[in-house]
């Protein structure tokens, strides 16, 4: 620095601040920071509170607006449902009348299942009929089997205790009579066994088939102890005898029935106790019945366990309807029905193992296999010009296996080798896992899985073999709900009164094309299902055919006891896949529905409603806010049977409840 020509330097010396003064300054700074932070927090809280108040006022405005139009919306929904139901009922009634008229024109020997006098007459006359020709007996058995199926259908619909008892008695009488006729024709054939000896085995064997049964008869004429194994190659059935039995004067009969009357009798004898269900089964008729729709609280209290579950309906505390005399109190809406399905949080399922089969957990498939032993009837023999044969009026006599005799049971040291059975899995049935074998306990008329051993399953040949203590009827079973829960599902429009229902299950995937009131199944597994895949059927016919074939995607009031359950929608006209950007998420409540702001990519569930959207009392009115004129027209003019078919499929499968991802 220059000053009057002299170079000088300024030197500043830092003077240390006293410790107390330095600490005081630091505290002042911290205090100021805290005050600023507190002021900022207060401002943020005030802003949030103001935002919440604005949202609350908006929600209250939307709720009030929804309440004002609630009665009109419910009345409009009631009208649409009632109009559709009336049309469906008329069409179904016309179809039933056509069936009755066609039956009358056929002059069929099969009686009308609803006319009990004719059913009783049929049973009486057939019981007294002495016809023994196999072909004629099997024709009569075929008529009886069809009659059993029709009476079974009536039994499922019956509500009168008297009707139920009458149908059950008829079913049991027909089942016993069919078995009795099988015994008569079997005895008649076996009486002449020695006239048709097989050159190779020097025994008798024959196979008789029709569309309902396969009957295999074998007579032990040579009593060769080395011939203990026999197969009816043409039908894939076989049996194995112990050495003592191979030397006995016996006949073996194997009958495979495509139908299952034994499980039917078991269900009649041991009806399932109706436990309190966490969900109610709601039919289209029930949706129209009068029921009180009460006003509840806001639908925003969604449990965390239900995050990202769309179309979820929560259980709300019900309060008194402020307008009990209005239309709203007389409508049982679809929202109420959906609420009943989705309001339960999944709970662990515990069951105790039992050898007696639970026919809800397991389903018999492919009919019944009757493996039985009889005393060989007295054979006819020729003396000169005469044919001599001892006549017995006792009919076929069951040959008791040594284990069934009292002497065997009294001797603790007694042993006897088991008998064996082998079957080729029935066609027209699919087993997605190795089948379970269950034998009939005749004392209680129930299926049991104990007493079966040495099970061997050859998947490539679809052949199953096993051992059991004695010959007895058995069935092959599959877990009823093995394809649940669904991994995903989609209902996609294909055009007017047409849609595609796709399910990705736990073990197999399928799709059902709906066209009007007809459905067509498509399935990756087609072996043995040519009668089912790619065929147009009504919904009830398709459901029955799928259940009979082991392709089960359907649920009932017992499903929740065996499957853990958990609690998207857009307009689309083109049959091509729906663009991901077009999907919207909705929350359906018993009192109101709303469009959600969240998307499928959201990290957590949020019940915040979509901006610029409104609340509605019904889902259909909520959709109408964003539907095009064509889409709106389709909601009102779609074919009534198409609507009924869609509703039936969704109600039978309940994908919103039994799907891991919605």
Image (cartoon, grey):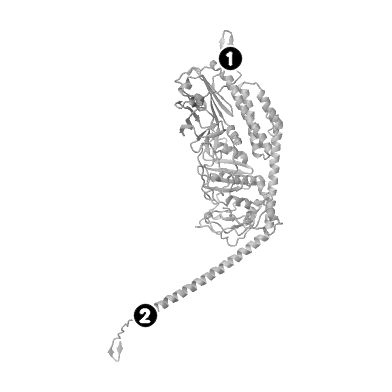
Residue identified by numbered label 1: 390
Residue 541: % across, % down: 62, 38
Is disc 2 in contact with disc 1, using a CB cutoff of under 8 Å? no
Whichever of labels 2 and 1 marks the residue nearer the N terminus, that label is: 2
> In this view of the protein, can residue 239 be seen by the observer?
no
Q: Position of residue 413 (x, y in %)?
A: 44, 26
Cα–Cα gap, marks 2 and 1 = 131 Å
Count of number-bearing discs? 2
Crowd band around label 1 with a 10 angstrom C-alpha radius: few (<14), some (14–19), many (20+): few
Q: Residue at x 66, y 22 (%)?
A: 129
- Which residue is at a point 59% across and 29% down the rendered structure image? 212
| Residue furthest out toward the bottom | 4
Q: Is residue 117 above or below residue 16?
A: above
Left or right: 488, with 138 as reference point: left
As rendered, which of 296 and 524 lies closer to the eye? 296
Image quarter of the N terminus? bottom left
Q: Residue 134: horizontal and vertical position, in percent?
A: 60, 22
Residue closest to the eye, 276 or 75: 276
In the picture, the disc for residue 20 is 2
Mark 2 burial class by Cα count in 10 Å: few <14, some 14-19, many 20+ = few
Helix, strand, or loop for circle 1? loop
In the foreground, 409 or 154:
409
Q: Which mark is residue 103?
A: none
Does the image show residue 579?
Answer: yes
Q: Secondary structure at mark 2?
A: helix
Q: Position of residue 574 (x, y in %)?
A: 58, 50
Residue 289 left/right relative to 299:
right
């Amino acid at each position: 620095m220059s000053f009057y020509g002299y170079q000088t330097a300024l030197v500043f010396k830092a003077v240390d601040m006293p410790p107390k003064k330095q600490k005081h300054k630091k505290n002042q700074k911290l205090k100021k920071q805290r005050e600023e932070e507190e002021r900022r927090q207060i401002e943020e809280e005030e802003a949030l509170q103001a935002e919440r108040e604005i949202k609350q006022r908006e929600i209250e405005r939307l709720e009030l607006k929804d309440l004002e139009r609630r009665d009109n919306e419910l009345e409009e929904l009631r009208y649409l449902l009632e109009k559709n139901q009336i049309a469906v009922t008329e069409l179904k009634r016309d179809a039933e009348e056509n069936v009755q008229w066609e039956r009358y024109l056929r002059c069929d020997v099969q009686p009308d299942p609803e006319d009990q006098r004719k059913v009783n007459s049929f049973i009486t006359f057939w019981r007294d009929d002495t016809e023994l020709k196999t072909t004629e007996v099997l024709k009569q058995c075929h008529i009886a089997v069809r009659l059993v199926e029709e009476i079974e259908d009536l039994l499922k619909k019956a509500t009168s205790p008297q009707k139920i008892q009458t149908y059950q008695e008829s079913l049991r009488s027909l089942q016993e009579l069919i078995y009795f006729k099988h015994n008569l024709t079997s005895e008649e054939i076996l009486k002449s066994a020695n006239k048709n000896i097989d050159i190779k085995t020097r025994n008798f064997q024959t196979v008789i088939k029709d569309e309902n049964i396969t009957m295999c008869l074998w007579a032990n004429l040579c009593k060769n102890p080395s011939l203990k194994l026999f197969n009816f190659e043409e039908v894939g059935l076989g049996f194995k005898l112990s050495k003592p039995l191979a030397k006995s004067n016996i006949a073996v009969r194997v009958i495979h029935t495509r139908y299952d009357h034994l499980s039917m009798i078991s269900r009649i004898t041991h009806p399932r106790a109706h436990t309190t269900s966490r969900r109610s089964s709601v039919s289209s008729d029930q949706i129209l019945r009068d029921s009180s729709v009460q006003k509840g609280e806001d639908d925003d209290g969604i449990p965390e366990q239900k995050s990202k579950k769309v179309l979820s309906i929560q259980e709300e505390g019900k309060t008194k309807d402020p307008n009990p005399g209005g239309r709203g109190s007389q409508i049982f809406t679809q929202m109420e029905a959906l609420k009943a399905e989705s309001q339960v949080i999944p709970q662990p399922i515990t069951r105790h193992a039992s050898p007696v089969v639970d026919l809800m957990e397991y389903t018999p498939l492919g009919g019944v296999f009757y493996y039985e032993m009889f005393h060989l009837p007295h054979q006819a023999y020729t003396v000169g010009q005469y044919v001599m044969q001892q006549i017995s009026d006792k009919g076929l006599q069951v040959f008791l296996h040594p284990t069934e005799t009292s002497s065997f049971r009294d001797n603790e040291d007694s042993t006897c080798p088991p008998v064996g059975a082998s079957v080729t899995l029935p066609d027209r049935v699919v087993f997605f896992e190795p089948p379970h074998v269950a034998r009939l306990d005749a004392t209680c008329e129930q299926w049991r899985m104990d007493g079966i051993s040495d099970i061997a399953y050859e998947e490539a040949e679809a052949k199953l073999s096993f051992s059991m203590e004695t010959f007895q009827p058995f069935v092959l079973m599959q877990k009823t709900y093995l394809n649940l829960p669904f991994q995903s599902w989609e209902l996609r429009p294909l055009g007017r009164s047409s849609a595609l229902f796709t399910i990705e299950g736990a073990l197999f995937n399928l799709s059902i094309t709906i066209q009007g009131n007809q459905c067509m199944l498509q399935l990756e597994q087609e072996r043995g299902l040519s009668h089912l895949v790619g065929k147009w059927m009504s919904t009830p016919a398709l459901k029955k055919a799928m259940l009979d074939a082991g392709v089960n995607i359907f649920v009932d009031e017992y499903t929740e006891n065996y499957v853990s359950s958990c609690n998207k929608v857009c307009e689309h006209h083109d049959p091509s896949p729906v663009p991901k950007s077009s999907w919207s998420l909705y929350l359906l409540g018993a009192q109101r529905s709303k469009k959600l702001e969240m998307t499928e990519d959201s990290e957590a569930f949020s019940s915040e409603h979509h901006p610029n959207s409104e609340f509605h009392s019904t889902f259909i009115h909520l959709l109408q806010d964003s539907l095009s004129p064509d889409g709106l027209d389709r909601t009102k003019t779609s074919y009534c049977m198409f609507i009924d078919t869609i509703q039936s499929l969704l109600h039978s499968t309940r994908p919103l409840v039994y799907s891991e991802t919605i």
